[in-house]
Image (spheres, rainbow, N blue to C red):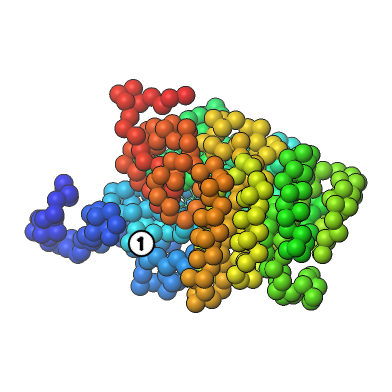
Amino acid sequence: MGLTSDGLAMKFTKTNPLQAMRIYFNSHPTKKLKTMFTETSLQEFRSSLRGTLIEPHDTGYEEARKVYNGMISKKPRMIVKCADVADVMRSVNFARESRLLLSVRSGGHNAGGLGICDDGVVIDLSSIKYTCVDPEAGTIVAGGGCTWADIDHATHAFGMATPSGIISSTGVGGLTTGGGLGHLTRKCGLTIDNLLSADVVLADGSFVTASAEKNADLFWAIRGGGGNFGVITAFTFRLHPVKMVYGGPMLYELTEAEAVMKWYRQLIKDAPDELNGFFAFLVVPPGPPFPEHLHMKNMCGIVWAYSGPMEKAEEVFRPIRSFKKPALDLVGPIPHPALQSMFDALFVSGMQWYWKADFVKELSDEAIKKHIEHGSKVPTMHSTMHLYPINGAAGRVGNKDTAWNNRDATWAMVIVGVDPDPANRDKITRWTKEYWEALHPYSTGGAYVNFMMDEGEERIKATYGSNYERLASIKGKYDPENLFRVNQNIKPQKQSKMNEVPA
Ligand SMILES: Cc1cc2nc3c(=O)[nH]c(=O)nc-3n(C[C@H](O)[C@H](O)[C@H](O)COP(=O)(O)OP(=O)(O)OC[C@H]3O[C@@H](n4cnc5c(N)ncnc54)[C@H](O)[C@@H]3O)c2cc1C
């Protein structure tokens, strides 16, 4: 039956009164998209699943629709807690056939709330959590719903690790498809530089593997192109022998900020790959291990992670410690997963979160002045500004080798307004925007997609730069109807007859 026109509901009940029931027929508020499914098709879909379908009237809906950012409150038509790849394929087919908006959720950490959507289907991967380490091959296969804590737990037992972020509750799905910056970036590259293959459910519901050998165009695109190309149900990563690291925060008084920033900007360019350190403006948390006299004090600092031989660590840190005596030095030997989760307890789910970002090539004296002006006024205990280095191993990969187009930048800057109290929403947003506006002129113009809110198409184009056209072409091949559009969206380009994608 051709169920497409506006008069559909009437026609359906006339021709098939016993099936009756209801046809759900909505206009999506933003896209003016007609969505449609019947009670029967919904029931069929539900009973085809191994996992759980949660609707607004179900117990558990309120919990299931929550995401990490407490500012986001979206109300999906249904949330599918997928148990396996078959559930994901069925969910993709159901959403496409019903013309429902579709979002994909792994860890739910996306600050713009891109793991969830209003009125549509949420494919929730959080139950697909398996890990499998192959110590001989030095690889891990991780289900699309793993957090980085799951992956670090599995690999640490073998004395190995793969690079990820700095908060271990973040999902493997969003962090990886966006790029992946963290403590091991300078030594091992971005997370995507360690991705060997991915299992992907495409917009037509089919299942493919993407790697250097298979579907190489798709493999190129998912390494930085976000969730635009399909649902990744499993990731295979290369592992590195990293068990202990020598790391932690080193804090300085704000009066030292200018000298520290000027010293740091050169030091991180000359540093060995094993030494990672991101610069921060912050407020010292009021509890251990921080000494009482520093509690709630605005300060600056560097969070270090040295992943070379432990016996060399003290030597590497000698010039760092002799540059200036820090007000607090918590740097020392620490198991890798402990560093990875060091800030988890501070940054819990449900807080108000607003951030803005940019890529930065040079930290000029002028830019440092502006940083100090705004960074000294971090407005709440959880708010901060980070400069993540992306040189070292990450910087030696070519801009055209993956979709991630900013290898020649030195840092990814992110200004983060965070607070548990919704009453402070405006305060943290204002500080973030004012800080960003002051620093944006000193940036490359684009930003790390995983540090972006909803900032529009031009910003996405500025980020992907000369890779955008190729991404749009690959999107046109794998998702011509833009089913996967709840993300930093790349619009599909119409395919030529030969369905060719430029190399
Ligand atoms: C506290 C905190 C700390 C962070 N620290 C870092 C950091 O150190 N380094 C860093 O690089 N980033 C960091 N981020 C940013 C983080 O990488 C992004 O927010 C990312 O989107 C989160 O991934 P997720 O799977 O948890 O998100 P979700 O909200 O679940 O998903 C976000 C988007 O990712 C896509 N996606 C998710 N899973 C899949 C999948 N399996 N297949 C296809 N697409 C998928 C979808 O398009 C979805 O819209 C941090 C974020 C937070 C909130």
423 versus 17 height, above or below: below
Query: Observer-nearest residue: 274 or 158?
Result: 274
Q: Is residue 202 left or right of residue 319?
A: left
Residue type at mark 1: give it. Asp
Is the residue indicated by label 1 positioned so its CB lies within 8 Å of ligand 1? no
- Choose top left, top right, bottom left or bottom right for residue 377: bottom right
Q: Position of residue 193 (x, y in %)?
A: 62, 37
Q: Position of residue 360 (x, y in %)?
A: 60, 44
Question: Residue visible at 33% across and 22% down?
Answer: 498
Are there few (<14), some (14-19), or many (20+) residues within 10 Å of tag 1?
Answer: some
What element does badge 1 sit on? loop
104 versus 57 height, above or below: above
Q: Position of residue 46 (x, y in %)?
A: 36, 59
185 versus 217 height, above or below: below
Tell how many labels: 1
Q: Is residue 298 left or right of residue 324?
A: left
Question: Residue visible at 33% across and 29% down?
Answer: 495
Query: Observer-nearest residue: 397 or 147?
Result: 397
Label 1: which residue? 118
Q: Is residue 71 left or right of residue 136?
A: left
